[in-house]
Every structure is written in C-alpha cells, then in structure tokens.
Amino acid sequence: MHGFSYKKGSLHCDEVDLNELAATHGTPLYVYSGGTIIDHFQRLDQALSGVPHEIAYAVKANSNLSVLRLLAAQGAGFDIVSGGELFRVLKAGGEAAHCTFAGVGKTRAEITYALQQGIYSFNVESEEELLYLNQVAGELGLRAPAAVRVNPNVDAKTHKYISTGKSENKFGVDFEAIPELYARAAADLPHIQLRGLQMHIGSQLTSIDPFIEAVEKVVPLVRHLQQHHAIEFWSIGGGIGIVYQNSLESGSAEWWQSRSASELPLTIERYGKELVPRLKDLGLKILLEPGRYLVGNAGVLLTRCLYEKKGLAKTFKIVDAGMNDLIRPALYEGHHEIVPLTQPATAARVVVDVVGPICESGDFFCQDRALPDFHPGECVALMSAGAYGFAMASNYNSRPLPAEVLVEGAAARVIRRRQTLEDLIEGEA
Ligand code: LLP
C-alpha cells in the first residue's frame, strides 16, 4: 500500500497535488510519501513482533537525510556500506551503535571511522577482511565487533545483477568455511569480537521460497556457532520485493484484499508468518536490512513531456528525466509504471517508447508500452522510484540532480534542492 492515488482528477501524494508540486518545484522531481515509509516500517516491525528483532534500514536505497531522520525517529537502525553512509546517518541523528557496516571492500579510512564512532558490527565479507579488521583495530587499541556474512549458495531467483547468495557471487564466505573461520578468529584474532552472523541472498525477491530455503539451511550453522561463541545476533538481510507492475492500483488496501494468495506478490505478513516460527527458538536478536520495501513504493519521479516524435517504426514521448535520474530500466530492465498526473478521461491507450534526453539508446523508461496518451507540457509519474532512484542518480551529460520533496500529510517540504549549474563544476580546477 502507498499514498499515491487520483483525487479530483489529479494524482496526489497523500494530501498533496502532484501537478502543483511539479509546477512549483519544476521537473524532474522526486516526491516521497512520509506516511508510506512509516506505515511500511511499522508493518514490518509488527510482522516480526514474535521474535526479538531490529530493523536496520539499508541506507543505499535512499540516503536523503530527511528520510534517514524519519526512520531514526521510528527506532530504525541502519545498514551502511560506506563511510559516506555512516556520515549521513550520524548527521541525520542516527546512532552508530545501531549501525551495521556491510560491503566487500572496506578501506582503512572507513574501518577507522566506523571503529571510532562505535558501530554495532562490521559485517565481514572475507577472511582477508577479517584479518585486516583485526590489524586496524589492534593499531587503534580497540576491539572490532564483527559478524561474518555467510554465502548460503541459495538462488534468490531475481535479476542476476541483484542476486548475491550464490557461490559465484562476490559476496560473503562459503557456508562450509564459516565454523573454521569463527574458530580461528576466536583463537588468533584478539581485536575481533564475534558478535553475530549475517546473510543477504539478493534483492527484489517476490517469492518467500528462497528466504525459507536460506533460513532453513543456515539455522543449523547458527546453532553450531552459538555453542562455541558468544554471538548475540543473526542478520537475515534485506531483499523483500515490492510491486512494480501494478504500482498505482496496489496503493489501496482493496487491491490487496481482492487478490487470491497465488496472485499476490510476497506480503510482509507472509514474510513474518513463515520466518518468525523458524527463528524464534534461537534466542538471538534477528536483524533485518530492508531497503526497497521501506521506501520503494513510497516515492515517484515526476517528469514533463518535452516532445512527441513519430518515427517510421515507433512513437517516442521525450521527457525531461533521463537514465541519469533513474537508471533502473537501463541497468536492470526494471519496470516502472508510467502514470499521467492528470487522470485520463478515457481508457484509450497509445503504444509508445518513453525516453529521456541522454545520448544513449539505453535511455528509456519503457519500450512499446500501451499508455494513456500524454502530450508536451504534461507531466507523468514514474512510480515506485523511492528506492535506488535518486540514490543511483548521476550528473551524466552534465545534468544537475533533481530536487527531492517529502510529503507529510498535507505538507510538502523540499528535502534537497535542485542542483544548479554552478554545483556541477564545484571542486573542479
Ligand atoms: N543488505 C545488503 C547486504 C545488501 O547488499 C542490500 C542490497 C540490502 C541489504 C537491501 O536490499 P533490499 O531490501 O533493498 O532489496 N540497485 C538495485 C538493488 C541493489 C541492491 C543491493 N544490495 C535495484 O535498483 O534494483
């Protein structure tokens, strides 16, 4: 569910008219529903209520300070992947003691910064990294809290670029090698404090099966580690998928209620119902690292149609957002529903490509898709763009980054101003 729907013929985010926001702040424009983010956080929290847990929001999905602040106020911890993300969390009022630090390539500077700030755990991705962490912590006269990421060799059945839990992926340590590595750390690495175990098998999982398979495979390993080490948490990662195909309709509770279980994507209630019983007897704190689930359906990218170009083979609607603003279609063939801000008067459709201004053929938001017609000057929303949207935006083609607006009820606030041309050359000689 989410806060985007037509009201009086115009698409709204909660109580705010998106046509008005586009007119006031210009386009391309990211708009987020604070209410949706909070609702998703609370529903996940509720779904896991049967087990001691902490939700560590995966900052990479959307790292705007105001989004982080909103989640910190809900009691979220944070899963970070760089010193930059830790800096953002601290600036937003989050606590280092509730941060876990993931990623295969942590640098000395990042490790030092995170140690000095006192993060909860380094989620270590290789034996080499564990040795290095021990060394750096030793030099600082500290002990580094750590968990190793286990690669359970489970197929997440998602796009190959966002699948992380198979042996051929660069992530984590092979399942079979974990007990020996923990034994070695306990015996030989005095500056490592083994605190937990971590896993993450992939992103945008729309079936519960890979989650169950991974949890069932790793539970015996967790029990083994508990017997030999004082571990206190198991992070089962993120990866909960969201609705992209019926994004607008899925905003309402009725849509979810009108579908049979087999037609529905993974619901958060199902996620909790299947996983909690498999986790609750462990006596460990369960960490979750959701990114997309919390913010994905809570954001849209507004863009205005500049031109309509009818070629021999196709009709192109050229809009003012490009792949630099939202790269998911180009990079993962990601589907984002495209919805006119002014509610279409009829059910008529035209088959079009919606493309951006960037000088690349991969710069499209859809190809050969049947959409309600729209014309130059009119705006559309690219739905479900709250996760990995702005966060992956770039200045490619020297295009200033779009502004971001956070809606809370009837109030809309700019949470990042649009970049200027001067911003583009800042720091250059
Ligand atoms: N934990 C770890 C260790 C991760 O690598 C990730 C995502 C997450 C948690 C959060 O996963 P989520 O709950 O958001 O699925 N840019 C891609 C997604 C990349 C995900 C990378 N890792 C996209 O736009 O689909």
Image (cartoon, helix red, strand yellow):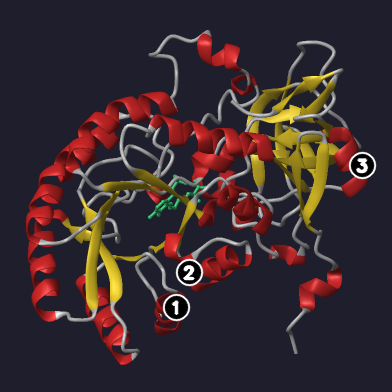
Q: Mark yes or no: residue 358 visible.
A: yes
Count residues near mark 2 (Cα–Cα under 10 Å), then give few for <14, some for 14-19, many for 20+. Answer: some
**Mark 1, secondary structure of its residue:** helix
Say which amino acid is labelled 3.
Ala
Residue at mark 2: 82
Q: Splitting the image into 4 quarters, where does residue 382 fall?
A: top right
The C terminus is located in which quarter?
bottom right
Residue 200, percent across and down? 32, 49
Residue 121, percent across and down? 34, 65
Count residues near mark 1 (Cα–Cα under 10 Å), then give few for <14, some for 14-19, many for 20+. Answer: some
Q: Splitting the image into 4 quarters, where does residue 229 fall?
A: bottom left
Q: Is residue 322 above or below residue 141?
A: above
**Mark 3, secondary structure of its residue:** helix
Q: Which mark is residue 23?
A: 3
Q: Residue 110 carries which label?
A: 1
Say which amino acid is labelled 1.
Glu
Q: Splitting the image into 4 quarters, where does residue 141 fall?
A: bottom left
> Sequence-wise, which precedes: disc 2 or disc 3?
3
Q: Is residue 171 above or below residue 111?
A: above
Residue 18, percent across and down? 83, 34
